[in-house]
Image: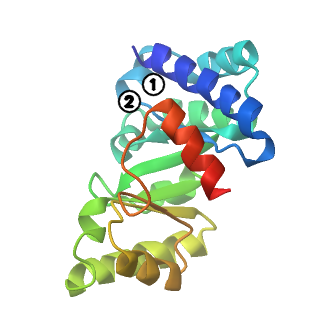
């Protein structure tokens, strides 16, 4: 199932490039630790990129913190091979799993996604705000891009932007959309 989803996502991203040209977004695909344990993901990714024609820099694989504590030598090799292809690597739901700061240095991660649990009440919850600030500061010092998940208000986005967050994801910008509606949304945003 994971392979099928990855393939379909890459095919869709190629369509975006055909329809939008240089303004086409990258596509991010969640990958489970189970997938990494069952097959050699770099080989799969390379084959799908070749077959679909998607430029590697337009693909981001989202992994969880849990993956980074399982068979770390083999996972490290696979992640390095993926980065050598030019594919981005993002840690999804950062801060909710088995957080270990050492893997941010050890693994070739390009992006962190701050879990929405920290974003939801950050305007009124000092602890959430402190955690968001800490994640942003750490990511910036490691030259990682940051996506805040679950952004629902303009106030949240303003706070995040002021603190140097690179991207916001959430209902403030859009609810999930069908393909055609998404293309219209992208055209209107660009």
- Tell me the SS state at disc 2: loop
User: Which residue was labeled with disc 2?
Assistant: 32
Q: Is residue 61 visible?
A: no
Quadrant location of the C terminus? bottom right
The percent position of residue 32, horizontal first and vertical second, equals 38, 30
The percent position of residue 161, horizontal first and vertical second, equals 51, 79
Labels 2, 1: front one: 2
The percent position of residue 15, horizontal first and vertical second, equals 68, 26
- Tell me the SS state at disc 1: helix
Tell me whether the residue at label 2 lies in contact with that at label 1, contact meaning CB atoms closer than 8 angstroms: yes
Residue 36, numbered label: 1
Of residues 130 and 66, the one nearer the viewer is 130
Q: CA distance from mark 2 to mark 1?
A: 7 Å
Residue drawn at the location 51% of the way across and 48% of the way down: 90
Crowd class of label 1 (few under 14; some 14 to 19; many from 20; radius 10 Å): some
Q: Quadrant of residue 8?
A: top right
Q: Is residue 35 visible?
A: yes
Residue drawn at the location 59% of the way across and 75% of the way down: 141
**Does residue 126 appear to the left or right of 172 in the view shown?**
left
**Above/below status of 148 relative to 43:** below
**Above/below status of 18 relative to 105:** above
Crowd class of label 2 (few under 14; some 14 to 19; many from 20; radius 10 Å): some
According to the image, what is the colour scheme of the structure?
A: rainbow
């Amino acid at each position: 199932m994971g392979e099928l989803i990855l393939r379909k996502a890459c095919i869709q991203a190629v369509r975006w490039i055909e329809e939008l040209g240089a303004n086409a977004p990258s596509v991010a695909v969640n990958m489970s630790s189970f997938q990494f344990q069952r097959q050699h993901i770099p080989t799969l990714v390379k084959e799908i990129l070749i077959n679909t024609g998607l430029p590697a820099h337009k693909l981001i694989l989202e992994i969880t913190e849990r993956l980074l504590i399982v068979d770390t030598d083999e996972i490290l090799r696979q992640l390095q091979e993926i980065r050598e292809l030019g594919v981005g690597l993002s840690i999804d739901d950062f801060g909710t799993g088995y957080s270990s700061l050492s893997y941010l240095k050890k693994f070739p991660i390009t992006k962190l996604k701050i879990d929405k649990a920290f974003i939801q009440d950050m305007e009124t919850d000092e602890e959430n705000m402190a955690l968001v600030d800490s994640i942003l500061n750490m990511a910036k010092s490691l030259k990682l891009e940051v996506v805040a998940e679950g952004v629902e208000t303009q106030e949240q986005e303003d706070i995040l932007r002021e603190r140097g967050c690179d991207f916001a994801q959430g209902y403030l910008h859009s609810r999930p959309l069908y393909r055609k509606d998404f293309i219209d949304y992208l055209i209107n945003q660009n």
